[in-house]
Amino acid sequence: RPGAQDAERPGHTHCPYCALQCAMSVTPTTGGVAEVTPEWFPTNRGGLCRKGWTAGDLLGHPDRLTTPLIRRDGRLQPCDWDTALDRVVDGIRRAQAAGGPDGVAVFGGGGLTNEKAYQLGKFTRLALGSRLIDYNGRWCMSSAAAAANRSFGLDRGLPFPVTDLSGARAVLLIGANPADTMPPFLQHLGTAAAAGGLIVADPRLSATARRALDGGGVHLRLRPGTDAALALGLLHLVVVTGAVDTRYLAARTTGFEDAWAHAAAWLPERTERVTGVSVALLERAVRLLADARDAGAGSYILTARGAEQHADGTSVVGAVIALALALGLPGRPRTGYGTLTGQGNGQGGREHGQKADQLPGYRMITDPDARTHVAAVWDVEPEQIPGPGLSAFELLDSLGQPGGPTAMLLHASNPVVSAPDADRVAERLRALDTLVVADFVLSETAALADVVLPVPQWAEEEGTLTNLEGRVLRRRRSITPPAGARDELWIWHELARRLDRGPERFPTDPRAVFDELARASAGGKADYSAVDWDRLDAGEVLHWPCGADSPAGTPRLFLDRFATPDGRARFMIDAPRTPAEPTDAAFPLLATTGRLLAHYQSGAQTRRVGELAAAEPRMWVQVHPVVARAAGLTDGAAARVVSRRGSVEAEVRCDEDMRTDTLFLPFHFAGTGRANLLTLPELDPHSRMPEFKVCAVRLEAAA
Ligand code: SF4
C-alpha cells in the first residue's frame, strides 16, 4: 500500500528493538502473551524479523519485574514503592552531601522514548543539579554523528527516506550487516543486489556479504581496523580513474585539496597491502558506484557500527564521507551517504539532551545562545544549567573513585554486558554507595543494584520515537503494565517531589513532555517545534527538522545546501592511525564483535525469549579451521579467547570463509561469555567512542 501511513489505530505501534522501527499491532491474549501482527509501513513494508515476531513474548514473561527490589543483607528483596524511593532519595542526599551536585550521575539509553530522553536530561540538570549524564548511544552512533556534524554541519542517520534506496543500482555498505541486524531493510537493497551492485566491506563473510556475492556483487574482506585506509584507497581510485565529480566539488564542497593530500598516498597496491582487499575488487567497487551515478540509477554509501566503533571512528567516517563527496553523492536526489542507526530510538535519543555535551534540539551545552533558549523553556536562569559532563565510559570509569560520583541512576542500559572492558565497569558499579537501576527484567547490571525499579515496556507506554531516517513515530499503549511497575516519568516526578526540587517541572503526561520538548527544540538542529501528537496520530509523515521554516518536515536534507555556515560540505580527513592495540606474540589474533539475527544488544531481552534463546543459546567464536587447529581445537570444542583485559569462554565454530588473522564474537551473551570482557576502552578523540571492533587476542582450549 504505497503511501499508507502510520494510521491512528488502537494497538498500532512499532517494534521495541532496532531503529528500522517496523510497524506492528499488539493484541493482548489470555495467558499473558501478547500477539504481534506486522503492519505495512514504508521501512518494513509488512515485514518483521524474528525478534519483532516474538517481541510480545516478553510482555507477560515470568522474569518481568513487578515490584521494586531493595538490597538487604546482601540480597535484592521485594519492597513497596515508598521504601524503594526513600532509599533512592537517601542515596542521592548522601552522595550530594559528600560530593556536591556531581556526587550523583545518571546513565540513559537509546531505547527511551523521546519524551523520556528529554525528561531524563532535564531531571539530571535541574532536579539533581548534576552535569554527569551520558548514555549508551555514545557507544552506538557517536562517531557517525561527530563526522556528519564536522562535514555536513548536521547529523541525521539517513538524510533521506529509507525507500530512496529501493531503486538504487549500487550501494556500498561499510561495516553494516542488515541481513542479521534489520532483515526487512534488505528489501530496499533488492535492486542493487539483483544488479550485482551490492558492495559489502566487512572483515568476515556476513549474511549481507553473502547476499552481495549471490547477486554477483562484491565483498571487500578487509583486515579489522583498516576501514579508514580502505576509504582513502577508494577515494584515491575515484580521483585517478576520473570518477571524481569536479563540478560538484567546486559548487558544493570545501577542502578537497587537503583530502587529496592524504588520499594521494593511498595507491591501490598500498591499500591492498594494508587492508587485504585486492586492487581488482577496489576498482570494481568504484566503477559500480560511479556507473550507477552516471546512469542516474541510484548510488549510495552507508556505514554502520563496523566502521564507526573504533578509537578513530570519527576519522573513518570522515574518510567515507570524503569518498561520497568525491563521487558527488550527498545532498542530491537518487544518490547519498548515510549511516544506519542501531537502537530503536538511537536517533531521538541523541537529540533531546541525555548526551553529556548536549541540550535539547541537538544544541551544544557550551553554546551560550543554546543555554539561554533552553533556560527560558525550563524557566530557570542559564547559569542554573550545569556544563558538559563526561562521556559514557569516562563517566562509568569514575564511579566510586576518589572525587567521583557515589550514586548513579541508570535507565534502559546494561553496561555490565555492553561496556568495553566490562569487568572493570562492573567493579566501578560495585564501588558505588547507591546504584539504582530502572528496568523491566533483572539485567546483569540490575543484579548489582541497591535499588531496582520496575518500569513498563514498549507496548505498555505512550510516547514517540525517531527512526533511522529522522521520522517521528508514535509508540502506543496496547497492554496494561503490571500493577507494580511505574512509568519513568512518574519516578522522576516523585523523586523531584521527595527531594523538594520542583516536581511541577517534571510532568507525568508524555504528551505534555513532548509539547515542551518541541518548544525546547525550536530553532535547534533537530527542530521538532511543528510536530505534535495530533499530527502524528493523523498519519502525517514528519521528518525533522520540522519547525517554523519547515512545517511539513524535511524528508531529504541538504538538497540546496549543507548545514555548514557557508552551505558547503567539508572534506575532513585525518591520517589513518595504527591499531590502538597491535598484535604481538602473546596476542597474535584480532578479535572483532557483532550482532546475531536472534539477539538484540546486550541480550537482556532476547535471551529471555524462548524461540530466540533456542536459536542462539550460548556464546561462540567464529574462527578459520587453520586457526582452530593451531590452538588444538576443532569445531564445537570449548575455547577461551584471551585479551589483555580478560577472557571469554566460547564454543568454536569453524568457518573456511574467516580470515586467518581474525576471530568473530557476538556480543549478546552474559557471564563468562561477555565479548566485552575483551574489548579496549581506548576512546576516539572526537566522539569518545571506544575501540569496540578490534582488539588483540589469543585463542586457546578451555581449561
Ligand atoms: Fe524490524 Fe528491527 Fe524489530 Fe526486526 S528488530 S522487527 S528489523 S524493528
Image: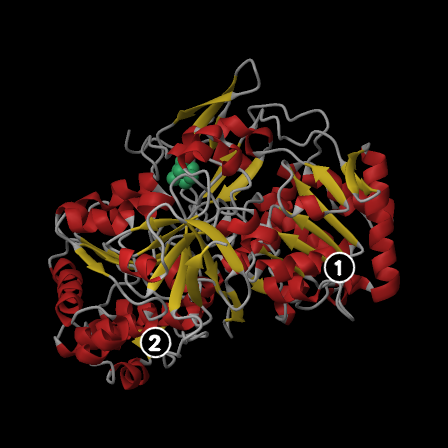
Whether residue 667 is visible, yes or no, is: yes
Q: Amino acid at mark 1?
A: Ala
Q: Taking 402 as reference, is 502 above or below it? A: above
- Name the disc covering residue 102, or none: none
Q: Amino acid at mark 2?
A: Phe
Q: Which residue is mark 2?
A: 571
- Residue depicted at x 62% and y 42%: 443
- Estimate how packed mark 2 is, as few (under 14), some (14 to 19) or many (20 or more) residues with alpha carbons within 10 Å: many
Q: Is residue 68 left or right of residue 610?
A: right
| CA gap, disc 1 and disc 2 | 44 Å
Mark 1 lies on a secondary structure that is: loop
Q: Which residue is mark 1?
A: 431
| Residue 52 on image: x %, y % | 43, 33
Res 394 → quadrant = bottom right
- Residue depicted at x 60% and y 48%: 413
| Residue 78 on image: x %, y % | 78, 32
Whether residue 568 is visible, yes or no, is: no
Q: Taking 495 as reference, is 475 above or below it? A: above
Q: Nearer the viewer, residue 9 or 229?
A: 229
Q: Quadrant of ligand 1?
A: top left
- Residue depicted at x 60% and y 62%: 392
Q: Taking 587 as reference, is 34 above or below it? A: above
Res 308 → quadrant = bottom left
Q: Nearer the viewer, residue 139 or 462?
A: 139
